Amino acid sequence: MGAPYVSVAELAERIQDGSLIALPPDYSLVAMAAVRALVRKGVRNLHVLGVPVAGFPADVLIGAGSVAAIETSAVSLGEAGFAPAFTRAATAGTVRVIDATCPAIHTALQAAEKGVPFLPLRGLLGSDVLRHRDDWRVIGNPFAANDPIVLIPAIRPDVALFHARFGDREGNVWVGRRRELATIAHAAHTALVTVEEVRGESLIEDETLAPGTISSVYVGALAHAPRGAWPLGLLDLYPPDEAHLAEYARMARTAEGFASYLARHVLGEPVPA
Amino acid sequence: MGAPYVSVAELAERIQDGSLIALPPDYSLVAMAAVRALVRKGVRNLHVLGVPVAGFPADVLIGAGSVAAIETSAVSLGEAGFAPAFTRAATAGTVRVIDATCPAIHTALQAAEKGVPFLPLRGLLGSDVLRHRDDWRVIGNPFAANDPIVLIPAIRPDVALFHARFGDREGNVWVGRRRELATIAHAAHTALVTVEEVRGESLIEDETLAPGTISSVYVGALAHAPRGAWPLGLLDLYPPDEAHLAEYARMARTAEGFASYLARHVLGEPVPA
Amino acid sequence: MELAPPEVQIAAIARLIAGAGHVAVGAASPIPAAAALLERVRSGGRTRVSILHRRRGNPFTEGSRELFDLAGQGRIDVFFLGGAQIDGEANINLVGIGGYPVPKVRFPGSFGSAFMYFSVPRVILYREEHSTRVLVERVDFVSAPGVSAENVHRPGGPVALVTGRCVFVFERVRRRFRLASLHPGHTVDEVIANTGFAFDRPERVPETETLSGEALDLLRGPVAAELAETYPEFARRAFGAGVG
Amino acid sequence: MELAPPEVQIAAIARLIAGAGHVAVGAASPIPAAAALLERVRSGGRTRVSILHRRRGNPFTEGSRELFDLAGQGRIDVFFLGGAQIDGEANINLVGIGGYPVPKVRFPGSFGSAFMYFSVPRVILYREEHSTRVLVERVDFVSAPGVSAENVHRPGGPVALVTGRCVFVFERVRRRFRLASLHPGHTVDEVIANTGFAFDRPERVPETETLSGEALDLLRGPVAAELAETYPEFARRAFGAGVG
């Protein structure tokens, strides 16, 4: 028995206010259609985890007032520049920013993936990233003398939200080489996944596709969302819509411009059936 | 610049006496042609790591006198029964057996994969597996009170030796869903890989095949070895040769029978070009 | 209809896993695998079954560590372990008899037991051979302990032991087995005589419920066929010509 | 032939990575990426280049953590970092200016710097803007420190800083930068005036060696074209019509 298919709006309904939600980076597979549905349903107080960095979806959620806190190694729109809503909220203090470094996010998720309370990570010592993390610990490496090392506690997100190239009838999803999505699916209590295309044949029984497949054991529900990553890209299927992202970066520089963007591209979007 | 293709014999020549060599389980992709070449070249004092269990190749190497020590969670021929050469050597004390448990082997390799000196693992407390491991440590979980947890030190094999379904011209190899091979390739100093088939097109540039591909960055050398996993199986391409394995299990019950097996199926095998 | 001994054991195990969300089957466990596959069919697919060594269409895509990671995440409800020796406190020995590291008799090794026994809420011990050689007072080597100190993180542990003669349930608080049912044709006296450890028992021990009608047809038909993919040798022996 | 400023910087970086086995390029680094791709071509492919954000044919198959795992394994020889602020001890700040956690000016964040700066033997700092705003006495926030105490496991660290005006090399023992070369048209006095930290310099500072002939053709031809796959906007700006 696999995971059920629901509408994108119903998928968004499964994400509660206050949830810790893990999002992939913009160059991975982002469930933008579901993020827009989240904004439309007026979700509040999300804790966003950028794995390992955050981008366009986080910025839209922050601008929409849906985010209480964000833990990430960076928030950026890549070539389109700084993330304007994040930058505004961070300097206004309206969003709590928990600064990390990329491998610390991976490490925290891998700890949850393995069911251990922490994993160690090299580096970090002497940085202000570490100095401001009361939840991280420095211990002496028990296998060597005088060798301090940082321990990162596990992060178990409530929800991993991402897009997949294919979903099959049992709820297995194919994400190809974007294996950070497997990590967040494993670490999270549940994965909610939009899929570009529904396939009839089992992804997991196919030796060619299985290696890029995340088992339905991790998936709570799916929604069919063609072009569901737009304006971000999907592997080799479609590229990011650079013009749209540049327009967003320009409009979102002011709160008013952000509101116009939202009205035009998010709130007005019809809910997919 | 990728990794070079050499003959199976030359691949075996790259494995020195005394090496720590990581081998996949029999149900994964085992480089049996290369293991036979190792026996023919008379390799000695290998330290074998079974990831996470050992089977047919380890038993052949032990029977041939090539193994000084084996660290593994088990040695077994699966449906063909106990591993006869291992059983004989373990009770005679001619091979040092370092008993582990499956996830401890994965954990030790993932520590090496991540470049950290150790990773924690739940379980194990109160077992004789732990009691006999002077190289493992128990600490108090620094994130909780009165919560003992085991730390497993990293294992960095000298060589990861396995078979792959495809190799491309750059030395990338496709192993499909057998991702334990990626872990041992990452953890080891170098991976030596036999490939069932050489493909002209890049495996890593192909979005469908990339997820099951291990990058040539980890690969030291490759050899083209059609039916290189035989008598073990290769994904859905060919099944294990159960009759041959049963014959091995029967013959290897005595040292004399093992010697006959070796003479017939290993030493007599012509070296592939 | 008379059931063969393996079918009785399969029936007993299937009953113990009823209602489980996710049953995982490790190395060389055809009888537990058969029970799990039967329960999947009977549950209409609500029980998920993952067989580690299934060669085609293996359910894992993260390599052989995924089973253990799943257990660490709390996503496996039922797992099976055996034992060359099993003692009255549910300690299991998969390593050897008579000395360590060079034992008189050597078994394959502990596999994942030293982790899975701690992680999976319902671990079912299965060993067909029920003799004082296997069911001992105290194991020679503890591959995985049956019970742990209170401060040990242990969401999992043993719930039952199924043998060729009977079903024991394990009571963690009392650290003892209790005889729960006898397979058809077996007696309490026989179980006592063939068990090396002391155990509790009710005044009247019921007979192990077996399979009949539709359930048995399922076992001998589609379940046997699916089993043969992973355990061809066992399926031939246990179900013979029924397996195409 | 006159080189545009980005081409001079690419030339300077390419020289610093000559002979490296494996160069990795992280987020938003088109100029270091161009230098790495140029070096790959010039080395006849002996220098491997991995660009994290390359969308098609991304070299990583283990997800976005593979870059960091590779660095932890010691398999990356060269990596690039920038800094909203960089100080005289090679500390870098990618987080913010004026207060934390609520700064006056906020930058994207530390990315992988707090790990990669420790792990990769040759980290090259690159920042086009060379001003007292960027090159400061002391950073407001240490995303990653330039030097560490002796007992800190640190196989990696900074080797050089390339700006729009010059190349500094970093001397770990002295914990100071030394001016190594000036880009064509720039002067020592100008560098002193625009640098917020003290640095060492030889009596005569050489000019940064640039590219000519075949190397320049390679840069403007195949390297620019490959760069455009990942950094289309930059490639249009820097190499214009040359990019098909």
Image: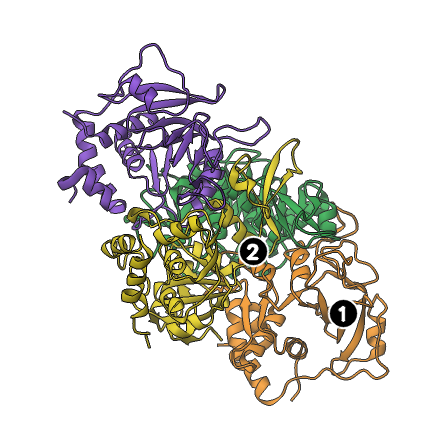
Chain colours: A green, B yellow, C purple, D orange
Q: Which residue is mark 1?
A: D130
Provide the secondary structure element on which disc 1 rests. loop
Q: Tell me if residue B182 can be seen.
A: yes
Check the image and name the residue furthest to the top: C203
The amino acid marked with disc number 2 is Ala
Q: Tell me if residue A31 can be seen.
A: no
Q: Looking at the image, do the residues carrying marks 2 and 1 touch, with CB atoms under 8 Å apart?
A: no
Q: Which residue is mark 2?
A: B112
* Cα distance in 3D space between marks 2 and 1: 40 Å
Q: Front-most of A60 and B265?
A: B265
Q: Are marks 2 and 1 on the same chain?
A: no
Find residue B181 and report its image quarter. bottom left
Provide the secondary structure element on which disc 2 rests. helix
Tally the marks: 2
In the image, C114: left or right of B135? left
The amino acid marked with disc number 1 is His
